Amino acid sequence: MLKLPLESVESCHLDSALLNMGDFLGHGLAGSFYVILGLWWYIKIIFMYVCKKQAQTCYHRSEAFFQRAEILEGTICLVMVLTGGTGLLTYSGSTEMTLRKEGQWIQLKRFQHLTIYLFFGLWAVTNILCFTIKSIPISLTKLMLTNAFSAGAFILYTHPHSPQVVDILLHELLCLAIFLAGLVSFIEVLIKENIMLALLRSSFTILHGSWFCQLAFVLYPPTGVLAWDLNDHINSVFFTICFCWHYAFIYVIMGVVYVAVTWFVKWRIRKPYPSEVVLLKNAEREEESEEEM
Amino acid sequence: MLKLPLESVESCHLDSALLNMGDFLGHGLAGSFYVILGLWWYIKIIFMYVCKKQAQTCYHRSEAFFQRAEILEGTICLVMVLTGGTGLLTYSGSTEMTLRKEGQWIQLKRFQHLTIYLFFGLWAVTNILCFTIKSIPISLTKLMLTNAFSAGAFILYTHPHSPQVVDILLHELLCLAIFLAGLVSFIEVLIKENIMLALLRSSFTILHGSWFCQLAFVLYPPTGVLAWDLNDHINSVFFTICFCWHYAFIYVIMGVVYVAVTWFVKWRIRKPYPSEVVLLKNAEREEESEEEM
Amino acid sequence: MLKLPLESVESCHLDSALLNMGDFLGHGLAGSFYVILGLWWYIKIIFMYVCKKQAQTCYHRSEAFFQRAEILEGTICLVMVLTGGTGLLTYSGSTEMTLRKEGQWIQLKRFQHLTIYLFFGLWAVTNILCFTIKSIPISLTKLMLTNAFSAGAFILYTHPHSPQVVDILLHELLCLAIFLAGLVSFIEVLIKENIMLALLRSSFTILHGSWFCQLAFVLYPPTGVLAWDLNDHINSVFFTICFCWHYAFIYVIMGVVYVAVTWFVKWRIRKPYPSEVVLLKNAEREEESEEEM
Amino acid sequence: MLKLPLESVESCHLDSALLNMGDFLGHGLAGSFYVILGLWWYIKIIFMYVCKKQAQTCYHRSEAFFQRAEILEGTICLVMVLTGGTGLLTYSGSTEMTLRKEGQWIQLKRFQHLTIYLFFGLWAVTNILCFTIKSIPISLTKLMLTNAFSAGAFILYTHPHSPQVVDILLHELLCLAIFLAGLVSFIEVLIKENIMLALLRSSFTILHGSWFCQLAFVLYPPTGVLAWDLNDHINSVFFTICFCWHYAFIYVIMGVVYVAVTWFVKWRIRKPYPSEVVLLKNAEREEESEEEM
């Protein structure tokens, strides 16, 4: 919809090996954060779903546990965002909180990253507040998540980048993944407690994270030597295939996690309850509770 | 979808200091109108939500009050639109209601603004009628609001503008904010009484207004001297960050307003009712009325 | 999404006065068809809504009447489509049903129009079948309508047109109106019996029709002399304003029609029933039946 | 949203007659697969709908049958995908599973096709698992179908193609059909058991398949001689009309299939039940079960 002609903004790229190493770490850490966040969401969803399926009592007992998990999630994210933000500000020796020096913009890219941190921080604070104060509706967390993802997609879309074909493609795919995650979050604001949407949101979040890591390895290799010709169109075709493989692989991993969680819950439940009662209970409930978490 | 090649329409821009002052006031007033409208909506939503949460009786008593508030809202908007429209027509000395003079278009931009006023006027009239005549469905007001916002986005999208990079970007972001407000209004036509959508609509409306003010200060500074190089790409990157900050700041403000309104309602309610009854009532109702206004 | 580079296809335009007259009539008739269709839908919707509001008995009595009206609508549309299609094939003296002659495409534009007729014909047939055979779900008519509108938008989008700025803009706006009508029809497939969507669908259909007439007057004036410079960007700005005015005017007309229909239904109902009973009935029912047709 | 500048990737096209024959078969087989899949879905939907309408008992008896049909569908798709994938890998004599040789990309297009097979394979596996293991929600199959269609659309969108106008258009229309099929599948994840969406999904799948065959005949004719000038804009206009005709023809075929299935079910049911009871049952149930499968 909105196209920024930023092709000429190349002066920001400094190609020293030191900065490259920093960029690799920065992108890799951000990617790992998204992968862990997405996986955590997925495990949480599956746990709640399997718990509910296996035995209602187990679910009621664990409701307080899930609420505490949400508050913990918010707190950890807040700590990570604060650490990341402080790290970003102090990294590379310059601690001054200024955007302009001698009539020139400095650290614009850094402030773009800080803006994403800011939105994730707002989400984390909302998460903590929603699960501690009862009068705030819970879907506010989904709304703030939509804002965080959308702001991320917007910032990535307007990121100044080099005019190299592969660089542009990798960032566009990154932007696509986070935009889709934001879109699914927004649908979750409207349609609550739908396990498919929650699953889709975590898969897009993991995809965003794993693609962040891929981007770090391709554009800012830790060896300091680019392995790819970033101007070759044929390389960009390969990366579109690679993006699909990432996505397919995430679903395979999610299947494995599902089997593991199901096995774990069954193993835990078998002890307190005789299995016959559980099976009886399941048979009654399996129709109506199919798609809700 | 539809791209007007209007880059060459620059002759409309007259750079005299007097016109600049007028443009600053015009954009600033429009921006303030949207900010106040959005804030008013937000306070109304929060008031209704908190009232309902605190005590049903309080809510029923205030239902007639809210209806009268809606009619007042429509009336004030209608008066503002009529004043603004008249002001726009008589401003700069030319009172003639003509679009063409001597085979040339004059005042095209003014008539574009008048069109936006026209749609907001239609919305205000609908608002008054819907809350006075019972047989008209209330969601018609949301439909007219969608039309008003969409017409605003359409007019902004096809606005003749200078070919300067920053000018284009600022207008595109303005258009994005009002388009999103219109989209949320449309979803509200389909999904009624959803507090998250109402909140999102008011946040986008405030964003549209505050960005209008930002644009007034950047493009038509009251001092008459442009502080920004409008052709510099690096400035446009800064403004994308700035847009996100506006949005984040709006949510911070909204959080503060929420706390203030909650405190105010609690303080008003504590007097007529003993607090135990209120608490008892809350405990019963807190599940089912969670997400409705 | 899909952009056809059809700028060079100008050889189809023959500028003789005779053809111009034919084009004016063709576009004008198509426009009138859409305006009448949209108005008919709107009156039907309002009639059903007001009937239901006024008295349940009146509504039940008129249910069979509305079903017969639907079949009549389908039949009239089918007759119009068949007449229009035959007229299009025989018009300008060439009755041959061929697309290619001597290795060259002939009559491509005519076959594009025939395709739109084909889809509206399919819709008309579905309308007749759905209201005569009970086992076919009624929302199939909305699906076929979505197809008809979407095919219309697709054909208009890929229409070969002259490279003149105003010509392109007028066709794009035409395409926008019919695309929105199709989108609303699709939402109606999912959300049934929503009066706001039905109202929006008829307003976009009327807009499409009235813009068709506007286009006929601008591009193929009956006088044979173009009154507008089609290459002037400033003219295209005027037409975007004009498009908004068409839309606003349609809502004013719809308001007038609403008042007329309400008055008419009240006048008809007052006779068989004593008004007190009617009022009593209304008071009971006004809450639950608010937004349904 | 994302535009790959792949115009220069032409070296992949080898114009020998042998390869052309292979390409014709490959595209034709893929097209036939989609046509058969879409038709199978359509017949299944109509069967379930008509069964439910005709007699509830008939439907309950056939529920187990439909479940077994789903598992069969998954198994056949899995076998076809595995056969197709193996065929693709071994075809043209090169069995090596490598993407890079001597620093150059080889077989990129083949790996793109393999990726589509991979996603359809994941969908087939999910289909088998969902209908054998009861604890997995059934709408997961729709989600995996959305992924398969979206991955197909993404791969087609980023496919390296020749810069010829007609070639680009044919691929864009192919991409449009599969994108719409994916979009409808996604809406089916959210809105379950809606016959209109299922019908739309099968129609877009058949359209995708039949357009695949059209593309095979136009771009890789079995005679080895291109019948069309792929650089002529006027040809691309014809193909947009042709695309609409494909779509209209699919609806005509679907109408014929509907009549055939209705007749078949009535003929089968008339034997065990006396027709009077069936008619009585219909009369009771025709209101509430209208739109559900």
Image (spheres, coloured by chain):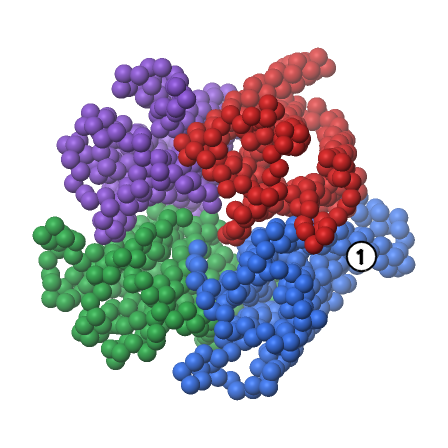
Chain colours: A red, B blue, C green, D purple
Left or right of D66? Residue C216 is: left
Which of the two residues, C280 or D16, is positioned nearer the viewer here? D16
Residue C293: image location, x then y, percent? 48, 60
Depth check, front residue: A266 or B38: B38
Q: State whether residue D284 appears in this view.
A: no
Question: Vertically, is A264 above or below D202?
Answer: above
- x, y percentage for residue C89? 16, 61
Q: Quadrant of the C terminus of chain A?
A: top right
Residue C254: percent from left, percent from top: 46, 72
Q: Is residue A149 above or below residue C250?
A: above
Image quadrant in which you'd find residue C179: bottom left
Which residue is found at the position 58% from the left and 70% from the top? B120
Q: Residue at x 28, y 43 (%)?
A: D164
- The residue at 41%/72% (across/down) is C235
Q: Secondary structure at mark 1?
A: helix
Chain containing mark 1: B
The disc labelled 1 sits on which kind of residue? Answer: Val
* D93 displayed left or right of A42: left
Quadrant in the rendering for residue C178: bottom left
- Say which of D138 and B117 sits in front: B117
Q: Position of residue C156 (x, y in %)?
A: 32, 58
Reading the image, the residue beneath label 1 is B261
Residue C157, located in which quarter of the rendered image?
bottom left
Evaluate whether residue A122 shows in this view.
Answer: yes
User: Residue sitting at 27 percent across and 27 percent down?
Assistant: D26
